[in-house]
Amino acid sequence: MNNNIKKLQKFRNDTYNLLGFAKDSTYDLMDAVLTTKTAYSLADFSLSPLFRRQWSSTYESLQDCRPNRSKLMKRYLKEIPINDSLYVTLAIDHTANPRLDSPTLKDRGYHHSPKNFQKVTEGHNYSTIAWIPEDSRSWALPLRHERITSFETPISKATWQLKQVRRSVNYPILALLDSEYGNASWVNQTVDVEVDCLIRIRSNCCLYGAPGQYSGRGRPRKHGDKFKLNDKLTWWDATEIVELNDDKLGKIKVRKWSQLHFLKSSSVNMTLILVERLETNKKGSLQKPLWLVFIGKQKLDILPLELLWKKYLRRFTVDHWYRFIKQRLHWTLPALSTPHQCERWSDLMPLITWQLWLAKDLVEEKYLPWQKPQKNLSPGRVAQSMFGLLVEIGTPARTPKPRGKSPGWESGQVRTKRTRYPVIKKRKSPDKKAKKKKT
């Protein structure tokens, strides 16, 4: 137990020195976020007994601090245990931070929002790459959580993040991605990255088999027969079929096809996997099939089909983490004035999550009367029980030194209105070949 406490204290001391300016007030702000379940503004965190400064320091800390994302990522990677597992499992996804009522916030765009009636919201978009522990249910430990600018796309940002992690990890990596990344654009941008990918693809996708032998006339073919996922008449015999019984899902049938590719990435071969639930659910209808593609150098003989498709189910822990930071860590609460302040506030979310992960075996669970005790604590339960531990281990932040009262705004000084920025609407650029045909 003492070793675990020392490990948490060392992590807090190391990350404290990576926050740049205003690291004392920033660390006090993080401790206040950890122990505050309900807040209505950023200033509410100053009411926490762990925040030893004035309420204005909550905003000034985010204005002055400079978290070093690369060094923080390397510090997070040191906490990943080295075991005999075949892969270091990572999950990649992106989510929106709505800012509908912030016309003076720069670089806002239109983003997908499933809860909104119109399915679209205005604000910033953030890309996350997280380590997924093997034996945990709802834990996802982010390595990078960064804003996608208007000059980037979720795929280009995720590719850059994956390259940064790959440079610092010496073990095989398996990246789990949702259907938005299941296209030729992702395949072409990550072709030089030594990472294996397991990606879900949409059921209306169309793949192509390997081309036949060269006939000796004209250009060699790039594509073979068409494989339409929603048309069984275009399917050919699977190279491997596995049937198994799952404790939760019942009978499962898994099929595999090899040597397939997307239309615009013919040089990269993929393995197609179909997961079907044979037993009916409570409503009496069959579940939708799950289509996956595996891209990588690792042979599937080492990682069999009955284990590979279960690996993908761990990707949904990123969705749990998004819900956790929005509801419990108040990520979308503050209406900060600049994109840089929003990014610095977002950099604290992975740091807080890693502290919860290191403290999950140290805290004494404090559950509410209507809650049941848990053996394996979730991030929310750990945060609910963190106050006593933080008081016991202390903080690396120094005590505040009052500087007296500020002179305030000078009389007669003119206040200028802040600049209002338009919401950026991205459009798909026309194909170059289509332009040539028109001309």
Image: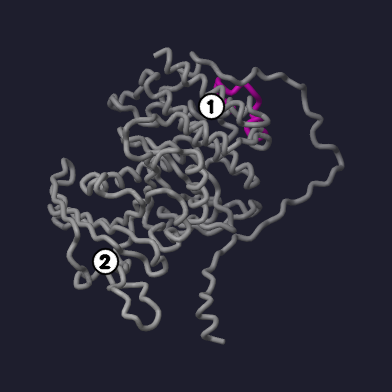
Q: In this rendering, does residue 292 appear at all?
A: yes
- 298 or 105: nearer the eye? 298
Q: Is residue 399 above or below residue 300?
A: above
Q: Is residue 96 found left or right of 217 in the rendered image?
A: right
Q: Is residue 399 found left or right of 366 in the rendered image?
A: right
What is the three-letter code of the residue carrying label 1?
Ala
- State the residue at coordinates (75%, 51%): 417
- 140 or 76: nearer the eye? 76
Q: Residues within 10 Å of mark 2 (few under 14, many from 20)?
A: some
Q: Which residues are magenta?
A: 46-60
Mark number for residue 229?
Answer: 2
- State the residue at coordinates (43%, 36%): 141
- The secondary structure making up most of the magenta span is loop
On-image quarter of the N terminus: top left
Please name the residue that numbered disc 1 is placed on.
32
Query: In which image quadrant can residue 172 be found?
Result: top left
The local secondary structure at tag 1 comes to helix
Q: Is residue 246 above or below residue 27?
A: below
What is the three-letter code of the residue carrying label 2?
Leu
- 227 or 385: nearer the eye? 227
- 91 or 101: nearer the eye? 91
- State the residue at coordinates (53%, 76%): 432
Mark 1 to mark 2 CA distance (whole Å): 50 Å
Query: In which image quadrant can residue 184 be found?
Result: bottom left
